Amino acid sequence: MNQPLRNDLQTINKTAVLVAVCLNDNKRSRENVLDELKGLVKTAGVKVVGELVQFRQMVHPGTCLGPGKIEELKLILEETRAELVIFDNNLTPGQGRRLEQETGRVIVDRSELILDIFATHARTAEARLQVELAQLQYNRTRLKRLWTHLERIDGGIGASRGPGEKQIETDRRLIDQRISELQSSLKEVEQRRERMVKQRRDHALVSLVGYTNAGKSTLMRALTGEEVYIADQLFATLDTKTRLWKIPGWGDALLSDTVGFVRDLPHSLVASFKSTLEEARHADLLLHVVDASNPEAEAQVATVEAVLEEIGVELKNFILVLNKADQVPDRMALDLLRARYEWSVSISARTGDGLDRLAQLVVDRLGDGLESVTVSTGIEDGKLLGWLSEHATIIDTHYSETTATFRCRISRSMLPRLRQRGTILEDHHDQSSLEAVG
């Protein structure tokens, strides 16, 4: 069978057969095996013309699918004339190459599909750099598969290497050079973003994280009143958005929305998007948004936690936000999920139900370990203002002819250092006034 040409790997407007090899010990529901893949291909603009699922104890080492199912796949391809076969599994380079030889179709695995979606949705220069890096790292080990059409050209009697192999070596060297350039550029972006995040410490930073399409952007709009892009598709936005959130009973805070996660994200993609997730790494509080109406909600929570751990985000101070509660068919499943987490709340970002309870939980979590104090000093003491901007959250400021008074929240561990600066503190926690020492 002729080898398919992979000159254009974009999936948009292509017809495809969807395939999944599901291990018998997998906890995912058998009825919903292809649901997420259908969402991904819909986002990628693919027309689905056929489906095939196989349950096995382990994937076939050579072709992922078993031999019998490969014959069944060939029949489906003959009937549907599909252009692509899209796997819900991540395939090894060898598995992909053998499947293309067997079927005569371009084989796209889960990682390749996700990378294609990210490439389509990348809008900013930073996102494009991140996606290009992830694509190059993915394709570097698959160059032989991309150049198999040159293997049919003989190098002559006694020739040790054909033109395909020589081209692979050249491409790999060029890819390595470009990867190095991209990593250097993204390192600068990461350092710049880290400095920017640290400089914005005059407000508490709350970060939305969660599975893709959990409703994070809808929640951001509901909480801040700001217009943000919302679409019923996976990975609708890739760039971090930050808006001012006026929290009742607290004051101003910064609310950031990050790229959504999905199971089996390509490792290279997670690594390259590390700078985009800088807000989550430095946030005072994480709001883990979950689509409570999804039957795989519990598995999605575990996926997000695993990715956050991979990029170095500590899950200490967070609230589990069970969104789309108005669409949950079985309230018992919702109650069981809430029971597992001390800090959780059910809401509907679409209708606004539960947003008041969420705001109160946020105030409680942000205030954990903090003291509300009033600091009074001379108006010429700019050093104190700079120190407070770095180490405290300033709620409001009042100036008179000779003094400046700041009402702020500060960690209890920082109170001794504040006292040493020769100020007078009014501690609202125990309603006492303290004369600073020093």
Image (cartoon, rainbow, N blue to C red):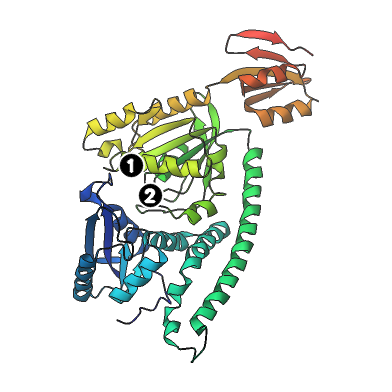
Q: Is residue 13 visible?
A: no
> Measuring 51% from the left and 67% from the top, which residue is drawn there?
140
Picture quarter containing residue 171? bottom right
Q: Which residue is mark 1?
A: 299
> Measuring 46% from the left and 89% from the top, which residue is drawn there?
154
Residue 126 pos. (x, y %): 57, 57
Q: Which quarter of the image is occupied by the C terminus?
A: top right
Furthest residue toward bottom: 157
Q: Which residue is mark 2?
A: 263
> Measuring 23% from the left and 67% from the top, which residue is drawn there?
67
Near-viewer residue (170 or 404): 170
Q: Which quarter of the image is occupied by the N terminus?
A: bottom left
Binning the other alpha carbons within 10 Å of mark 1 as few (below 14), some (14 to 19) or many (20 upward) gives few
Element marked by disc 2: loop
What amino acid type is highlighted by mark number 1? Ala
Q: Earlier in the sequence, mark 2 or mark 1?
A: 2
Residue 270 pos. (x, y %): 49, 51
Q: Are marks 2 and 1 in contact (CB under 8 Å)?
A: yes
Residue 80 pos. (x, y %): 21, 73
> Measuring 29% from the left and 36% from the top, which residue is drawn there?
325
- Determine the CA span between mark 2 and mark 1: 9 Å
In the displayed structure, 66 sits above or below 224; it is below
Q: Please tell me the numbered disc located at residue 146.
A: none
In the displayed structure, 62 sits above or below 276; it is below
Going by the image, does 373 lie left or right of 231?
Answer: right
Badge count: 2
